[in-house]
Image: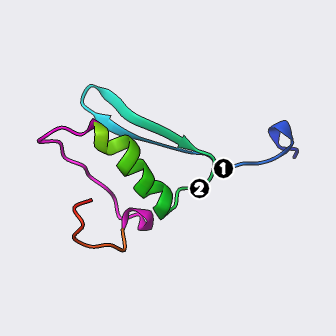
Amino acid sequence: MDAPFGHWGTQTFIAALRCYGLTAPWIIHHAMNRVSFETYVQTQLSPTLEPGDLVILDNLVVHKSTQRGTGR
C-alpha cells in the first residue's frame, strides 16, 4: 500500500507519568537511541523532577548508559 503523505517515517513519543498526569512530553522524528534518551533525560525530564520523585525504567538497552556512577 501507499504510505500516507508518500513516505514512512518513525516518530517516538516519550513522557513521564505522574499521579496527576503526563509531564515532560517529547517527540523525536526517529527511533529512540541512547543519545536521544540521554538528551531527553537531561533536557526534558530532569528539570521536572522534585525531591522525593522516583524514576522507574525498564530494561530497554537505550536506558543503559555506558557511563557508570555519574549521578545521571
Residue indicated by mark 2 = 31
Question: Element under label 2?
Answer: loop
Label 1 crowding class (10 Å Cα cut-off): few <14, some 14-19, many 20+? Answer: few
On whether residue 60 falls in the magenta region, the answer is: yes
Q: Whole-percent x and y of residue 32?
A: 53, 56
The percent coordinates of residue 31 (x first, y second) are: 59, 55
Q: Position of residue 34 (x, y in %)?
A: 46, 63
Disc 2 crowd, CA 10 A, few/some/many (<14, 14-19, 20+): few
Q: Is residue 38 magenta?
A: no
Q: Secondary structure at mark 1?
A: loop
**Residue 64 as seen in the image, left or right of residue 8:** left
Give the extent of the magenta segment.
48-64
Residues at marks 1 and 2 touching, judged by CB atoms closer than 8 Å: yes
Residue at 43% from the left image edge and 68% from the top image edge: 61
Residue 24 as seen in the image, left or right of residue 70 = right
Please, is residue 68 above or below residue 37 in the view? below
Above or below, 35 relative to 9: below
Which three-letter amino acid code belongs to the residue tagged 2?
Ala
Label 1 is placed on what type of residue?
Answer: Thr
Taking the spot 32% from the left edge, 72% from the top edge, the residue there is 67
Quarter of the rendering occupied by the C terminus: bottom left
Return the residue at label 1: 10
Q: Name the image colouring.
A: rainbow
Q: Residue at x 72, y 48 (%)?
A: 9
> Which mark is first along the chain, 2 or 1?
1
Q: Is residue 28 above or below residue 62?
A: above
For image coordinates 36% across by 31% down, the residue present is 22
- Cα separation, mark 1 vs mark 2, equals 6 Å
Rendering coords of residue 49 (x, y %): 24, 40
